[in-house]
């Protein structure tokens, strides 16, 4: 974790002013907050859970260091005894969450944190910041993987992802949701994700002739080269690639393929495939890139455009068609009193919760029920306990385990819910007990 | 700078494989790369420069440490002599750039880096990552500031910004473009930005009665409290705020105002204003928030909705209507040979450049010309030298100086170009010399 990532100051000021007011009021009771998404962004019918590991790391390490306390003291907002309290504050609560890689739906709690109210409150900003981004991107990446119909996808998003942390988290979340590699070297190093890449137009352009650039590149990478062939003229580039492949074959080496990054990708892929096939280089692969979204991929799959794989950047890396979701972190219980909010369009459900999933006879997801944490429903429980009394209470799954979790869940998700346009709404109901609690709570207000 | 921010591995793999190929080919000549935006996103007619400081810090500190080199060695892609070369690599080049806070336009180079080609190439990913995000957000924030017509705006974007780095950079970029404060405490601490905040619904809901929550809060903040009044019923909340204001007045304290975060904001602001005015509390301020974009602000300004200021979050923090721009970093010169790219839709202009700005008799921007760096045009030069031979060659302006730069530039930008819908296209031409160079370069290909 970097300095910015884990600073206790990476929070909204109001978290700390509310904490000061709670402290002064000696309001230190146990509170439960619930994190959930109120509504689906356009064309979304499911979400993929991601980001919990970063939240657990943050909670485990939460502490205000001397520099942070000095800065807060200089603001002349906080009392000395409160700052003293902050200096000793650690996270002592419990965390329940939906494991990373699992599919979840609107209204379902992704994470529930129970702790003394100050602790549970001040972590709000970081919890939303990480799970919002990572679940958003994992969901977007899942849409690409689904649309690509088995063709491998590589994350190229780092350059236009929103900052360095997003670049890292996009690599991780897209890998979690089925991408096979990333171009992000630091993400490869930190998360153990396979790294991949080709070459840039600048490399080709720095040589006077394209074929000289190709020769210089394959000299260094005799078994892993992918040549970018659209710097000047894609078809001429394809013929140069054929020449290179033949020279390499004589040396017992193997060109992997080419990348096309501009123009009418479908037409060019077909023309290039023909150049290669005519040269008996049927094994040469063609990689597509250049601002593709999941709708482009679906269209190309349907039209049998002969791309073997894709490099996917900008539009995945910021979930360009839906760059945010209405994810909120709401107080649902304080000192055993169920709590809800009635603000127009922002109403919430009280109490500690569990999500129960029911499958059909073939193991496919049939429906979910959102109920109370201690309710006895028969479905599979989605939320697991990850932290108790401030300590990790179980082993966190590795990234590759989360990846397998996603594969299994996605296979069990009905095709109509997976559709990348106008998906069918998956049935999620609120249990009778939860409905009763809500009615009681509204009455009490 | 944090660990993730300044790692030399925070780059695309192809930057390093191209570097290996350059190295093997002993291709170590001087290259110039130019960073620019090809086209305006929807409703954009100008951009605000931001992010250069982070790029300069990154270049100054660029180095591959032992852990990075070990990771690269383990990939079995790179030769030992190349890794040895990388271990000693530092940035030794020059950087020209448009100062942060200045207005710039489509096609204009924002940054130009001249260095031995490996150095100039491998920094591409980070340079785009930072300047793309920060200029995108500074531009979006400028649109909000313009639409708000002088009403102060506070950045609330941290929770839904894309990750921790984006949260920090959004605070900085929005302050640069005229926001008055941020809720992001770490950004306040790191950048010296004023911090501000109110309270959350959870604070109110944790008390059995709203007015008890208000009393507990103002006890801690007798001179800086803003009460959130829409947790249950906004008008009832306004009456509670009146009660609190009167209690405070008796104690010689002063309530600042209230915040409304949901429902029909315009109707509620008017109703709440009437409650306050009827109680002779005309000085109580009303702050609006809740998913507002610049179009909402413009509409409320036109309709005289009585909000005194706004908290601005999600849609600013990711530039939600245009979350990316087509920013590219292109090789424009290698060993004094001008270079361009002819890829369809991605053609570029050769040579080291300068942007020349011409004003009308009243000091307003009239037109820009993009020319060659050493061209003798009479306009104001936008690009300044920031680094030479790997050393900072001048003092970098402070954030508050960049903020003043923005104010001056924005005042000189014609109103028609500032329009938040369908802005008029500002005239940017290419100089005769640059046109000639381009024609010559195309001929040579």
Image (cartoon, coloured by chain):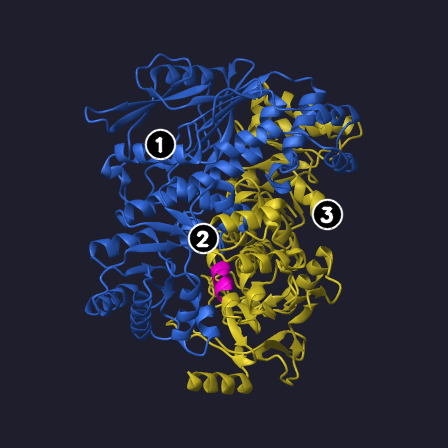
Chain colours: A yellow, B blue
x and y, in percent, of residue B385 in the image: 46, 20
Q: Is residue A121 above or below residue B366?
A: below
Q: Secondary structure at mark 3?
A: loop
Q: Nearer the viewer, mark 3 or mark 2?
A: 2
Total residue callouts? 3
Q: Which residue is mark 3?
A: A192
- Farthest front residue in view: B251
CA gap, disc 2 to disc 1?
A: 24 Å
**Residue drawn 61% across the image and 46% down it:** A168
Relative to residue B285, is residue A337 drawn left or right?
A: right
Is residue A19 covered in magenta?
yes
Q: Which residue is mark 1?
A: B405
x and y, in percent, of residue A88 in the image: 64, 58
Q: Is residue B161 above or below residue A420?
A: above
CA gap, disc 3 to disc 1?
A: 44 Å
x and y, in percent, of residue B305 in the image: 23, 59
Q: Bounds of the magenta span?
A: A15-21
Q: Earlier in the sequence, mark 2 or mark 1?
A: 2
Q: Is residue B261 visible?
A: no
């Amino acid at each position: 974790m970097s300095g910015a990532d884990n600073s206790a100051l990476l929070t909204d000021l109001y978290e700390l002013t509310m904490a000061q007011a709670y402290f002064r009021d000696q309001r230190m009771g146990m509170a439960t907050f619930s994190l959930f998404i109120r509504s689906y962004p356009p064309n979304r019918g499911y979400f993929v859970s991601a980001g919990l590991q970063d939240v657990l790391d943050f909670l485990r390490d939460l502490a205000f260091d001397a520099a942070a306390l000095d800065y807060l003291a200089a603001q002349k907002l906080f009392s000395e005894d409160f700052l003293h309290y902050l200096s000793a504050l650690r996270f002592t609560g419990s965390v329940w969450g939906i494991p990373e890689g699992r599919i979840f739906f609107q209204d379902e709690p992704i994470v529930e944190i129970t702790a003394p109210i100050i602790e549970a409150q001040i972590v709000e900003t970081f919890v939303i910041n990480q799970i919002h981004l990572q679940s958003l991107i994992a969901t977007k990446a899942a849409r690409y993987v689904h649309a690509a119909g088995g063709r491998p996808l590589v994350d190229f998003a780092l350059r236009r992802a929103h900052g360095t942390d997003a670049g890292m988290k996009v690599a991780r979340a897209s890998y979690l949701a089925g991408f096979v590699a990333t171009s992000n070297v630091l993400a490869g190093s930190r998360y153990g994700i396979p790294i991949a890449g080709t070459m840039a137009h600048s490399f080709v352009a720095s040589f006077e002739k394209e074929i000289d650039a190709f020769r210089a590149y394959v000299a260094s990478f005799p078994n892993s080269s992918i040549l970018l062939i659209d710097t000047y003229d894609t078809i001429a580039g394809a013929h140069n690639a054929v020449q290179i492949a033949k020279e390499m074959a004589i040396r017992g080496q193997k060109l992997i393929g080419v990348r096309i990054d501009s123009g009418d990708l479908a037409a060019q892929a077909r023309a290039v495939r023909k150049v290669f096939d005519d040269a008996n280089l049927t094994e040469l692969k063609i990689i597509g890139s250049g601002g593709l979204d999941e709708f482009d991929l679906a269209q190309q799959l349907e039209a049998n455009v002969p791309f073997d794989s894709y490099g996917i950047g900008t539009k995945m890396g910021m979930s360009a068609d839906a760059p945010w979701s209405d994810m909120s972190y709401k107080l649902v219980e304080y000192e055993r009193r169920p709590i809800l909010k009635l603000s127009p369009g922002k109403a919430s459900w009280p109490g500690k919760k569990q999500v129960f999933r029911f499958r059909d006879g073939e193991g496919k997801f049939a429906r979910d029920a959102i109920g109370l944490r201690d309710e006895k429903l028969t479905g599979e429980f989605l939320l697991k306990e990850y932290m108790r009394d401030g300590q990790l209470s179980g082993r966190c799954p590795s990234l590759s385990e989360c990846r397998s979790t996603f594969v299994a869940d996605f296979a069990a998700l009905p095709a109509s819910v997976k559709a990348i346009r106008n998906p069918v709404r998956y049935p999620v109901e609120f249990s009778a007990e939860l409905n009763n609690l809500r009615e009681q709570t509204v009455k009490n207000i």
